[in-house]
């Protein structure tokens, strides 16, 4: 299965709405880790479900990820993948000042010949996601970062670019095209 | 300018609150949205914002950062501490280009960061998008 993890923070939601507007169902499981409070999660998920054809899911824990689905990490919990397939939610310490943290989700993935991985970092404050993206790169993932010049807040993508030799530094419209071409 | 005032406001529908000590900004944003069918509150300070929230405001908040007394980040910290984030989407609304990284701990409460000067069409589109989320 193709697992795509998208990390996003301040300024990222508007990019995600652009990327997933009229977005068709694709053969990948997409996980969005958006820094947000718990109360915002259902509203954010509802908005995405209104604009795309993917099955938008707020996991409760225990779900096995499936293609054609878009999972939203709930606010105030970290989302991890056990055996690269089962979603677990934890309320352990904040990482990089946030929960959910992008790094936590990305760092749980392990080498797995059954899977293909992609990591994407969008606009945001701080450095969350940089280590996670580096880890995904070490697993052979395709790594993508939103062009900092197109970001509302540049520091998160810049942190990723600083420590990881990313494969693509592209604008939101190109991220959308990239995702549309994924199997 | 005839903004809906905090007391007696309709708390059943989501509105827009602009928090800024610059009267020109408040006037401009109010002009952009005054014909819209949702409440518009104009707060001149962080404290006024908190007062509106105590009176039941819910919706989108455009929050200036640099204000006398309680700045935008302090105001958000107060909102979080009082457990009033429910039913709110907050965007910073500021001329300050790069946020202070020492405020990383508040980033999960800030959905967006809109810089001034702004394109009216873009601001309207964003506010509409966020109000749709809250509806």
Image (tube, rainbow, N blue to C red):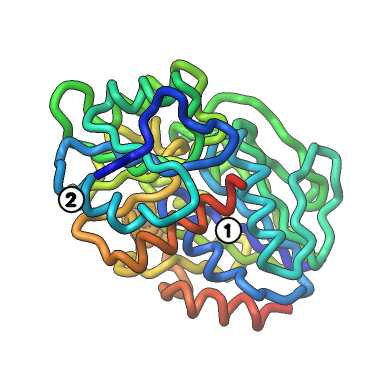
For disc 2, the marked residue is: B95
Q: Does A165 sit left or right of A59 as displayed? A: left
For disc 1, the marked residue is: A6
Q: x, y (%) of residue B102? A: 27, 32
Q: x, y (%) of residue B92? A: 32, 44
Q: Does A120 sit left or right of B115 as displayed? A: right
> What is the chain letter for disc 1?
A
The disc at residue B122 is none
Foreground: A70 or B52?
B52
**SS for dot 1:** strand
Foreground: B19 or A45?
B19
Q: Are marks 1 and 2 in contact (CB under 8 Å)?
A: no
Marks 1 and 2, how far apart in space?
Answer: 29 Å
**Residue under the point 65% across and 75% down:** A22
Which quadrant, please, contains the C terminus of chain A? bottom right
- How many residues crowd mark 1 within 10 Å: few (<14), some (14–19), many (20+)? many
Foreground: B78 or A73?
B78
Q: x, y (%) of residue A118? A: 62, 66
Q: Does B50 sit left or right of A121 as displayed? A: left
In front: mark 1 or mark 2?
2
**Residue under the point 68% across and 43% down:** A42
> What is the chain letter for disc 2?
B
Q: x, y (%) of residue A137? A: 55, 63
Q: Answer above or below: position of A179 versus A161.
A: below
């Amino acid at each position: 299965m193709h697992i795509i993890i998208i990390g996003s923070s301040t300024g990222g939601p508007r990019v995600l709405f652009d990327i997933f507007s009229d977005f068709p169902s694709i053969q990948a499981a997409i996980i969005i880790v958006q820094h947000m409070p718990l109360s915002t999660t259902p509203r954010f998920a509802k908005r995405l479900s209104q604009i795309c054809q993917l099955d938008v899911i707020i996991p409760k824990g225990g779900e096995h990820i499936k293609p054609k689905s878009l999972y939203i990490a709930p606010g105030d919990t970290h989302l991890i993948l056990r055996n690269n397939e089962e979603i677990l939610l934890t309320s352990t310490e904040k990482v990089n000042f946030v929960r959910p943290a992008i790094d936590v989700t990305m760092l749980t993935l392990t080498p797995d010949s059954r899977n293909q991985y992609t990591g994407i970092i969008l606009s945001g404050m701080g450095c969350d996601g940089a280590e996670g993206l580096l880890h995904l790169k070490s697993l052979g993932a395709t790594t993508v970062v939103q062009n900092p010049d197109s970001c509302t807040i540049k520091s998160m993508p810049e942190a990723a670019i600083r420590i990881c030799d990313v494969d693509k530094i592209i604008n939101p419209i190109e991220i959308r095209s990239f995702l549309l071409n994924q199997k | 300018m005839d903004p809906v005032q905090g007391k007696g406001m309709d708390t059943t529908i989501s509105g827009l609150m602009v928090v800024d000590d610059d009267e020109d900004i408040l006037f401009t944003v109010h002009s952009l949205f005054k014909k819209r069918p949702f409440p518009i509150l104009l707060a001149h300070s962080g404290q006024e914002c908190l007062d509106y929230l105590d009176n039941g405001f819910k919706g989108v908040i455009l929050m200036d950062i640099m204000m006398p007394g309680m700045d935008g980040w302090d105001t958000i910290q107060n909102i979080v501490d009082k457990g009033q984030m429910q039913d709110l989407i907050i965007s910073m609304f500021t001329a300050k280009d790069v946020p202070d990284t020492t405020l990383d701990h508040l980033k999960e409460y800030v959905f967006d960061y809109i810089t001034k000067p702004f394109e009216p069409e873009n601001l309207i589109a964003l506010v509409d998008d966020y109000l749709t989320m809250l509806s």
